Image (cartoon, grey):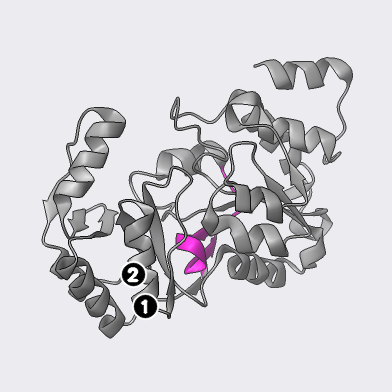
Amino acid sequence: MPDKEHRKGIVSFDLDMTLLDHGTWKIPASAMRAIERLRREYIIVIASGRNMDAPYSVTYRDWVKPDAIIHLNGTRVSVGDQVLYEHLMEKEKLRALLDFAQEHQLSVGITDEQGDFYTCPDQVRQMDMERWQVSDRKFRDPWLLMDRPVKTLAYVGGPEGAKLMEEHFPDFKFPMFAGNQGADIVEQEASKAMGLRRLCEYYGIDLSHTIAFGDSMNDLEIIEEAGVGVAMGNALPAIKEAADYVTDPIDKDGVWNACVKLRLFSTDGQEEKDGRTV
């Protein structure tokens, strides 16, 4: 494997519904094959709204084995065990968000290794039941978050709740998830794109030599700013409009097909066929 100085650039992937298919809770075999081919010449990055070091995400992190990770929409950036950047939400802003969510019966909080810290937890239970027919979360007092390091929050609910918070908190953005069942809550200055810029500086790679795959609104900035932005076929319309290239959906080998179409690695006809049909 070539060292970082001899790689062509950076290829970053959102996790949920870009690499990880929520229909199967697996990464398609063709996407894994594409990553292994890309790894020979590119730096592989996961750029997610998740903390990829959290217990509910490490399995997927270890499947992909990225060179670097943009966690929590750019509020933490790491290369291996080295943390390049980390930003915590100010306590006054956190308190204001929790107060507002509680007052307006909105479900806002985080899930981590210590449990589920949400205002209005019944809404989270309802979402779990609709999606998985079971909810086994360990809900705890959301106000315990005031004594913990918080980088971003999540909102569980429909677009109307995100819009209401957006109107009252101009210092934050509330990018909806692809299924419109929730949103990230991120300070305006944070983004996956800023995380990508930090990695470009670390690796000495120009931003023009980056490719970013995504599907949801928290991918908008990185899709716009990367050298090539790739929207999955299952992406939200705004992501497709911003992208340089729209590939097939996640369950139709979208990652592999985009890599072949963009000639990110060479392939013969049989290998291309195998990649598409697994």
Name the side, left or right, on which 115 lies relative to 201: left
Name the side, left or right, on which 147 lies relative to 17: left
Q: Position of residue 46 (x, y in %)?
A: 57, 51
Residue at label 2? 165
| Image quadrant where one finds the C terminus | top right
| Image quadrant where one finds the N terminus | top right
> Is 8 a magenta residue?
no
The residue under the point 17% across, 37% down is 136
Q: Position of residue 193 (x, y in %)?
A: 62, 66
Q: Are marks 1 and 2 in contact (CB under 8 Å)?
A: yes
Mark number for residue 169?
1
Q: Position of residue 75 (x, y in %)?
A: 47, 69
Q: Position of residue 157 (x, y in %)?
A: 30, 51
Image height of 206 relative to 93, above or below? above
The residue under the point 58% across, 56% down is 219
SS at mark 1? loop
Residue interval drawn in magenta: 65-83
Does residue 175 show up?
yes
The residue under the point 34% across, 69% down is 165
Mark 1: give few (<14), some (14-19) or many (20+) Cα within 10 Å.
Answer: some
Image height of 116 relative to 151, above or below? above
